[in-house]
Amino acid sequence: QVQLVESGGGLVKPGGSLRLSCSASGFSFSDYYLAWIRQAPGRRLEYISYISARSEVIYYGDSVKGRFTMSRDNAKESLDLQMNNLRVEDTGLYFCARVETSRGYDSSFVDFWGQGTLVTVSS
Amino acid sequence: SYELTQPPSVSVSPGQTVNITCSGDALGQKYVSWYQQKTGQSPVVVIYEDTKRPSGIPERFSGSNSGNTATLTISGTQATDEADYYCQAWDSRTWVFGGGAKLTVV
């Protein structure tokens, strides 16, 4: 069965860095878009970054552009999110997600989610 | 940026039908997905492409989308349906979520 397992979350001071990882199994990893979706306290779910199957397309939300870097290794079936210059407002639960895009962006949706890894940015 | 608006909370009695709405400019021209998130769990898609139900999702979940409003309908609501419900649509560069509606079954 499809599994997405995040790791790397923790407590960090403002301005610090963290690297999140997502290990995938149970599906053809190199065929799918993947995304990092953040759920911050009191705020709506947010696609902070997504990456196409072969890394041709990488999107960053305005809130993280220039600070976060998303990458994938199809051979290792892993996904990473390097987070630099972290801010208090980056606090939240970070989900690794598989995005079903076979019928185009407009009809796409997340068909599998990881359990999330918690990032807390606080002094 | 494109915004999706949901009521913060909705309540329903067990066995009744409830509609959860999601509003956005010309939303009827986009596809909408709906996610259910129970406390302490990851979201699960219950409707995609406005009306389609993934395998394993009960038939009591249905969706519609027209004009500026998409609607998730739960018929014969059960206590186990108590959760937060989020709508999602594509907006030129990325997917956006509504703010979520907390469904209480009382």
Image: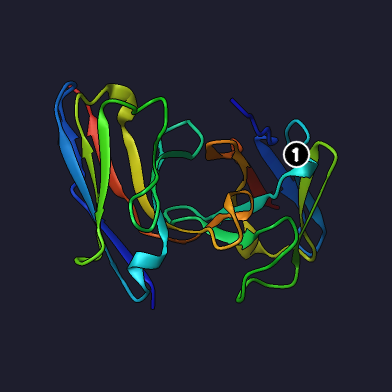
Task: Identify the image's colour scheme: rainbow, by chain, secondary structure or one colour.
Answer: rainbow
Residue at left offset 73%, top offset 33%: B24
**Disc 1 designates what residue?**
B27
Nearest to the observer: residue B83 or residue A61: A61
Q: Name above or below for residue A66 compared with residue A45.
A: above
Residue at left offset 47%, top offset 31%: A42
Amino acid type at circle 1 is Leu
Name the quadrant containing residue A76. bottom left
Q: Name above or below for residue A35 compared with residue B26.
A: below
Nearest to the observer: residue A73 or residue B44: A73
How many numbered marks are there?
Answer: 1
Q: Name above or below for residue A38 compared with residue A24.
A: above
In this rendering, does residue A36 appear at all? Answer: no
- In the rendered image, the residue lying farthest to the front is A56
Residue at left offset 79%, top offset 66%: B76
**Residue A88: image location, x then y, percent:** 28, 23
Q: Is residue B51 left or right of residue A42?
A: right
**Residue A26: image location, x then y, percent:** 34, 76
